Image (cartoon, rainbow, N blue to C red):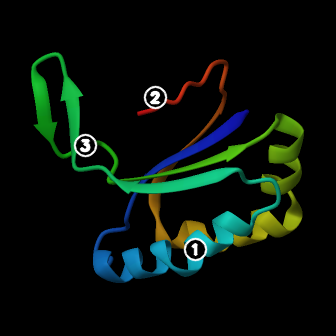
Amino acid sequence: MIRLTVLYNLPPGTDEAEFLRWRTGEHQQENESMPGVITTDFGRIDQHWTPEGMQNGAPYRFMTIADFPDRETFERAFLSPDAQGDLNNDLKRIHNPLFLVSEILISSEKKG
């Protein structure tokens, strides 16, 4: 499985509530409808951990994750000209993004 993780902030002066309406509505639907997407999650980062303990704030405010069954499916969906065109428009709404592409080597789900 291939996982796309995007960490990002909002540009200074952005209305966070307005961004969240767009991100959890229209944009979430776009992510879900991307060919091959298995799951997609979106979260707000409120704290981070260091060896000294939990810390408020973090280098990034938001995180989006999208899972694809394999690299070929990911590349066909995410790197397509249409997807890249949409991404260029979406990048205007975020600041300082970090895009990570990882191959999940093992995954487990706790049941019960």
Q: On the image, numbered disc 3 is attached to which residue?
A: 58
Percent coordinates x, y for residue 52 in the rendering: 10, 19
Residue 48 got which mark? none
- Label 1, residues with CA under 10 Å away: few <14, some 14-19, many ≥20: some
- Screen quadrant of the C terminus: top left
Looking at numbered disc 1 in the image, what kind of residue is underneath it? His
Does residue 106 lie above or below 35 as drawn? above
| Residue in the picture at 87% in, 64% down | 81
Q: Is residue 35 left or right of residue 40?
A: right
* Amino acid on which the number 3 mark rests in the picture: Ala
Q: Quadrant of residue 55?
A: top left
Q: Earlier in the sequence, mark 2 or mark 1?
A: 1
Residue 30 appears anywhere in the view: yes
In this rendering, is residue 18 above or below 81?
below
- Amino acid type indicated by mark 2: Lys
Position of 80 relative to 4 (above/below): below
Inspect this view and state whether residue 87 appears: no
* Left or right side of 5 for 11: left
Residue tagged 2: 110
